[in-house]
Amino acid sequence: MKIEKRKVGDITVFDIKGKILAGEGVDELRESINQSVDAAETKILFNFKDVPYLDSTGLGEVVRSYTSVKNRGGVVKIVNLTNKVQDLLSVTKLITVFETFNDENEAIKSFS
């Protein structure tokens, strides 16, 4: 898994590429989110366009990230869910927790 972090105004976008699995990417995601939280970056957008799959550990890390940012007064949103990941979020009912978008510009505007 690879994470590229970029700024769009005051929003931190994480372009995540690859599967988010136990032992493969979860630690990287945790480290990246912790760095952002420590730097007071409270508007986070996960771009899942290139995330074909995440396992229960990966899903747990996404939820932990959401909670960590929210506890600091921030917000996490997700854009470009793949069908498989969207199905997983639907089955686990987490689709009701995360605000999700199909278009990055729309997601960026929603932070205003």
Image (tube, rainbow, N blue to C red):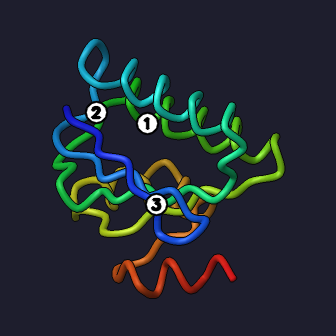
| For residue 50, side relative to residue 98 (left or right) | left
Residue 76: quadrant of the picture: bottom right
Q: Mark on residue 39?
A: none
Secondary structure at numbered mark 2? loop
Residue 28, quarter of the rendered image: top left
In this view, the mark in front (3 or 1): 3
Mark 2 touching mark 1, by CB under 8 A? Answer: yes
Work out which quarter of the rendered image holds the N terminus and state it.
Answer: top left
- As measured in the structure, the alpha-carbon distance from the residue carrying label 2 to the one carrying label 3 is 22 Å
Mark 2 crowd level (few <14, some 14–19, many ≥20, 10 Å Cα): many
Residue type of the residue flagged with mark 3 = Lys
Q: Does label 2 or label 1 sit earlier along the sequence?
A: 2
Question: What residue sits right under mark 3 in the picture?
Answer: 7
Viewer-proximal residue among 94 and 36:
36
The residue that disc 2 covers is 20
Q: Residue at x 49, y 60 (%)?
A: 45
